Amino acid sequence: MLDLSMEIWRNKLSGKFFIYLGDTGQAEGLFVTPLGEIKSLEKGLFEEVIAEDEAEITGPQRQRFQEYSDKRRVYIASRIVDMIAEMEPYDLDEFILRVKEKEERRRRFDPEDDDEI
């Protein structure tokens, strides 16, 4: 299952906490603001908070992050289905083989996680 982890960054000037979603290009990143808005902002304005203290995250931020995560999960799954549908049979066979190999390696290192594929 695809799981987006919540990365919390603190604004250096205001001290407020933002949720970092990813890069948008050059020196900018996509953030969820304390008001629950998604904005592209300069990453230099922030410092990553290593010890995640989700208590500092507002309700609107939490809700927007969940909405973003859900939409991203659906989008990625849809893209994967589309890519598989476009594969030639020999490419599909190779893809299936690699997925099985990766699944086997993961099971060897984390046998309790078998239901999470």
Image (cartoon, grey):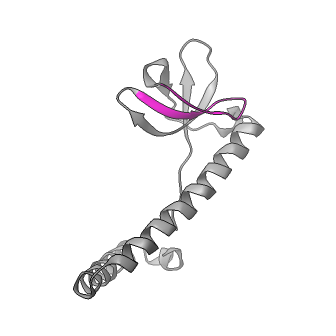
Magenta stretch in the rendered image: 28-41
Q: Quadrant of residue 108?
A: bottom left
Decide: is 64 above or below 1.
above
Q: Nearer the viewer, residue 40 or 10?
A: 40
Decide: is 35 above or below 74.
above
Q: Nearer the viewer, residue 33 or 103?
A: 33
Q: Is residue 54 left or right of residue 105?
A: right
In the rendered image, residue 30 lying in the magenta stretch gets the answer yes
Residue 81: x %, y % from top left: 45, 74
Q: Residue at 31% of width from left, 79% of height from top?
A: 87
Q: Quadrant of residue 94?
A: bottom left
Q: Residue at 61% of width from left, 49% of height from top?
A: 68
Decide: is 79 above or below 28.
below
Residue 103: x %, y % from top left: 36, 78
Magenta span: predominant SS is: strand
Residue 2: x %, y % from top left: 51, 63
Q: Residue at 49% of width from left, 22% of height from top?
A: 46
In the rendered image, residue 34 lying in the magenta stretch gets the answer yes
Residue 25: x %, y % from top left: 38, 33
Q: Residue furthest right?
A: 59
How many numbered marks, from 0 up?
A: 0
Q: Nearer the viewer, residue 93 or 103?
A: 93
Q: Is residue 33 left or right of residue 102?
A: right
Q: Is residue 109 left or right of residue 55?
A: left
Q: Quadrant of residue 55?
A: top right
Q: Residue at 38% of width from left, 26% of height from top?
A: 27
Q: Residue furthest front?
A: 86
